[in-house]
Image: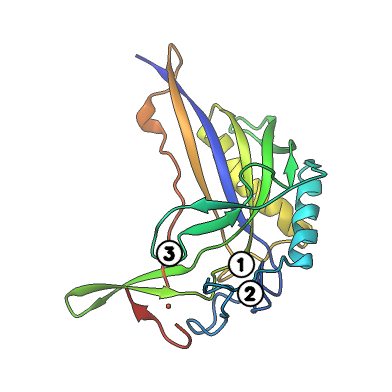
Amino acid sequence: MEFEAVIGLEIHIELNCATKLFCDCPNNPGDEPNVNTCPVCLWFPGASPRLSRAALEKAALLCLGLNAEIQPVSAFDQKVYYYPDLPKGYQLSQAHLPLSRGGWIDITDEDGSAKRLRIHHIHMEEDVAKLVHEMEGRKPVSLVDFNRAGASAGGNRHGTGFPHASSRDGISQGAPRSGSQRGLLRMQYGKRHDARGRQHFYPHQRYKPDEYKSGSKKHELGAPRGRCHRL
């Protein structure tokens, strides 16, 4: 039986802001572990986050650069999940009222033809900490670095309907490239984009399911000020 993959992607892009999304800590994940932290980005109880104006402006420019419609009202939600890189147990994201909706990006398909892919919405969210997995002799250990925790990140959620793997690759490369051209992203150490995807296979189409692999967000782990600590 033949199949065709129908792929939807969520692409995470880190903005090149000088400070983090909800505090004034430097946005330099490549520094020594846990030197760019405060009670807000360490998620201490009682800490009061304040939204960065610079992050909001750059996120809005990214929306406009991707032909999206900025919404008159947007809000942050608590996205609850439990993982060592998120010790407070939830992430501040925009699940219900994102910054913008709609939009599109043009790519070149595998046969050289132009293709326009639609964007469902663009939302803002705080990044999580970085996990580092190492070995102490023969014993594996996991460390946490909070330099990246709370960094400004934008999520592009692209609608399903990418019939080729090349379309998926084009959108994952095109969105960061579009942001870089507008001075919104800094693709270097500590600044990255990643993608996670969902896909469905329908019979009667022409591709085998083992030709496609669903993308998944890469969790990297990292630790308290000045040094990494063991989980």
The percent coordinates of residue 28 (x first, y second) are 60, 77
Q: Which mark is residue 27?
A: 2
Residue bearing mark 3: 220
Q: Residue furthest front?
A: 46
* Discs 1, 2 touching: Cβ within 8 Å: yes
At mark 3, the secondary structure is loop
Mark 3 or mark 1, whichever is nearer to me: 1
Front-lying residue, 139 or 186: 139
Q: How many residues crowd mark 2 within 10 Å: few (<14), some (14–19), many (20+)? A: many
The percent coordinates of residue 130 (x first, y second) are 46, 69
Task: Answer left or right for 33 relative to 62.
Answer: left
Amino acid carrying label 2: it is: Asn
Q: How far apart are marks 3 and 2 (CA)?
A: 17 Å
What residue is rendered at 68% in x and 74% in y?
19
Residue bearing mark 1: 151
Position of the C terminus by quadrant: bottom left
At mark 2, the secondary structure is loop
State the colouring used for the structure image: rainbow
* Discs 3, 2 touching: Cβ within 8 Å: no
